[in-house]
Amino acid sequence: MEKFTTHTGVAAPLRASNVDTDQIIPAEYLKRITRTGYEDALFSAWRQDPDFVLNQPAYSGASILVAGPDFGTGSSREHAVWALHDYGFQVVVSARFADIFRGNAGKGGLVTAEVPQSVVEQLWAYLDENPGAEVTVDLQNLRIVAGDIEAGFVIDDYVRWRLLEGLDDIGITLQHADEIEMFEDQRPAFKPTTV
Amino acid sequence: MAKTLAEKVWDDHVVRSAEGAPDLLYIDLHLIHEVTSPQAFDGLRAAGRPVRRPELTIATEDHNVPTLEIDKPIADPVSRAQVEALRANCAEFGVPIHPLGDAEQGIVHVVGPQLGLTQPGMTIVCGDSHTSTHGAFGALAFGIGTSEVEHVLATQTLPLKPFKTMAVNVDGELPTGVTAKDLILAIIAQIGTGGGQGYVIEYRGPAIEKLSMEQRMTICNMSIEAGARAGMIAPDETTFAYLRGRERAPADFEQAVEYWRTLVTDPDARFDKEVTIDAASLTPFVTWGTNPGQGLPLAASVPAPEDFEDPNAQAAARKALEYMGLTPGTPLKDIAVDTVFVGSCTNGRIEDLRAAANVLRGRQVAESVTMLVVPGSVKVRLDAQAEGLDKVFTDAGAEWRNAGCSMCLAMNPDKLRPQERSASTSNRNFEGRQGPGGRTHLVSPEVAAATAVAGHLAAPSDLEV
């Protein structure tokens, strides 16, 4: 995974709450067995509407999504993170993220910047006045800067560390293989097996 | 120290705990299916890693399999490739699999419990958010993404921060005609789709204790729809009776029961949050909008955006009403449907099919309605046929299908057409969930069957005798 320290890019306002993962990527696209190439699938139903924010020229090349609360609810599909990432998004800003989505984002190198809804509203107003404006998300210092707006954001400490270092979870865990073995030796015999 | 049920199960699985890092949690059972696993196996191959414990892993095919002509090759080449990838991966890595055509094939969350693999006090994960279903047994069970699937395959563990705990106390008794599905839809409407974020919910109280295992699974299944990581119900005699004699139940059953009996929240343990619901006040419940929290009693009318105080809720309601093609003030019972779907990991078990069949027996599905009955597993299908339920469904004019997720998420050919409206026993009414442009109302199996007969949303008590 690539290291993430700070990112500056065009931010797109997505004025919707409860953006579930079925909207981010409909199930039809989940039949593929690859991990990349999902940019066409992102918000595919909403993108058929010419007025949808990502169809507006000002937001072409957007890499920061500023969304309403409860982003990423529903299905556990990590394809939602892959689709956002493949489209070019590096950061999603929202007041609340669904737990599984947030976890998946951390694995896929997508930053979930949690801010109060009042900050989301400020960013929306700023982007309405300045369509196509760039916003900076600084993971090192946990700051978002957009014009005169400067706000802090929240992300899990451990996820932040992994993103800053660009570390692979499995590699970290396998450093403790001996402890896993010790645990396995003590598991009760009545626990079921599948074979 | 006094602990909640969730904390006891968590603590029993901590491999490693260190300051500033997540706990490393051991996983007792890993369920996999065709959709969220292929990229995880690719990751293992790329890194040259084996599956650490294939005998704690089990695969089945459910999300995109057809429910008709299952003896023929899958017609959709992309679906077929995905199912074939699962079979090849399982063969390469030594993971047991129940493929299409196998007697134990079915929806992953129906298969685990019916085999007796789902037991109290276990940690269970699957690359599917409805893994919360297994919490009905007092297991800590939750959905994970594909990166975590790979992590569990490689290490049989997951690095996780402890979840917060929430008690949902259900007092009183469910009135006659009110089901577990109505109860969980009412709970979600009360706490909201984000109300459970970060929490494991423990459902407690007299109304919960009276539920059968299958009803408890319906409740825990939809915990994710309230945003919760998992839902749990403490194991009791009902749980033990369900498990006794199942294929994968412990050989030394009494020893296991002795441990399972300790899996209750201590009397003086504290939850981070508590919510109370009065079961006696409930009536059949349906959704009118495009998230599972947008629900109301069946006797109510379509709300207006102005009925909501929060501006975000108002905007969400406005958008939902437009998508659903509904006018505020319309009685919910006046809403005509085109399709009725009975099935899914929420309501695709034998008791659900019995409940729907009891309403349909001696009646006819309205001419304007197509009704699909999709058993949750091959075993459910065979059990239903042994009881003659298939005959009840087909005599009434419903279609009797093979097992799978089917129209719950429309990855297979079972889909709504644009603007088609369904009453569905599944778990999500998101835009396009059951097919692009499709409109979904979530209901119980009883309401689904009554709706199929009436042609519009209805409870069994609304039907003429």
Image (spheres, coloured by chain):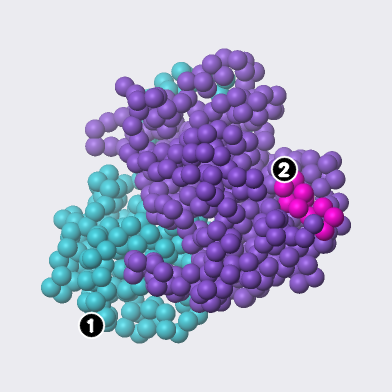
Q: Is residue A180 visible?
A: no
Magenta span: helix, strand or loop, mainly? helix
At a point 43% along the width and 56% down the height, the residue shown is B193
Location of residue B358 in the rendering, given as x and y in whole percent from the top left corner: 77, 49
Q: Which residue is mark 1?
A: A129
Q: Establish if B85 lies above or below B307.
A: above
Q: Which residue is mark 2?
A: B350
Q: Secondary structure at mark 2?
A: helix
As for residue B359 lying within the magenta part, the answer is: yes
Residue in front for this viewpoint, B411 or B135 = B135
The boundaries of the magenta stretch are B354-363
Q: Is residue B320 left or right of residue B285?
A: left
**Image quadrant occupied by the C terminus of chain B:** bottom right
Q: Establish if B54 lies above or below B192.
A: above
- Badge 2: few (under 14), some or many (20 or more) residues near its Cα, within 10 Å? many
Location of residue A95 in the rendering, given as x and y in whole percent from the top left corner: 30, 60
Q: Amino acid at mark 2?
A: Ile
Q: Secondary structure at mark 1?
A: helix
Colour given to chain A in the rendered image = cyan
At a point 84% along the width and 41% down the height, the residue shown is B386
Residue in front for this viewpoint, A183 or B49 = A183
Q: Amino acid at mark 1?
A: Glu
Q: Establish if B284 lies above or below B383.
A: below
Residue in front for this viewpoint, B40 or B47 = B40
Q: Is residue B364 left or right of residue B179?
A: right
Q: Is residue A102 left or right of residue A116?
A: right
Colour given to chain B in the rendered image = purple
Residue in front for this viewpoint, B294 or B406 = B294
* Alpha-carbon span between mark 2 and mark 1: 57 Å
Q: Dot 1 falls on which chain?
A: A
As for residue B99 lying within the magenta part, the answer is: no
Q: Residue furthest left?
A: A148
